[in-house]
Amino acid sequence: HHRQDPPPIPTRVSSRQLRLTEEEKRLLAQEGVTLPSTLPLTQAEERILKKVRRKIRNKQSAQDSRRRKKEYLDGLESRAAACSAQNQELRKKVQELEKRNGSLLRQLQALIKQTSNKAAQTSTCVLV
């Protein structure tokens, strides 16, 4: 299914260097391709280089995506832990306040009882 490339159109010979990153060199070698060190490249070579560069971009994009997901999950986990700790503290505080409330309620009932007893005694005195 390989298409025959059209014969290269004669162009002005350029002696610009083709600069490849280590990653590009590694992937090209993995594909069993050696590109010339000077430009211009043939259409087939251009296609191969574009394919390799696209693979590298996709790999980088996937790594970034995984890193962002990990950061997001780490953030959620730490927020969940903080909320859980705060929840514990608040439960403890509610318990203490309920206890205090019960104690104050008992004191209030005792005062009301005392006051009503005194009032009864006072009215008794008035009646006498």
Image (tube, rainbow, N blue to C red):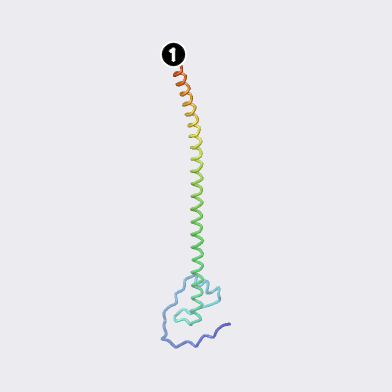
Label 1 residue SS: helix
Farthest residue to the right: give it. 1
Q: Quadrant of the C terminus?
A: top left
Front in this rendered view, residue 123 or 28: 123
Q: In which quarter of the image is the N terminus?
A: bottom right
Pointer 1 residue: 127
Determine whether 45 is above or below 95 in the image: below
Count of marks, rendered view? 1
Q: What residue type is labelled 1?
A: Leu
Front in this rendered view, residue 40 or 105: 105
User: Which residue is depicted at the point 48% across and 29% down?
Assistant: 105
Crowd rating for badge 1 (residues with CA inside 10 Å; few <14, some 14–19, many 20+): few
User: Which residue is depicted at the point 51% across and 36% down?
Assistant: 95
Q: In which quarter of the image is residue 119?
A: top left
Determine whether 82 is above or below 108 in the image: below
Q: Where is residue 82 in the image (x, y as percent from the top left)?
A: 49, 46
Q: Where is residue 25 in the image (x, y as percent from the top left)?
A: 50, 73
Farthest residue to the top: give it. 128
Determine whether 53 is above or below 115 in the image: below
Q: Position of residue 103 (x, y in %)?
A: 49, 29
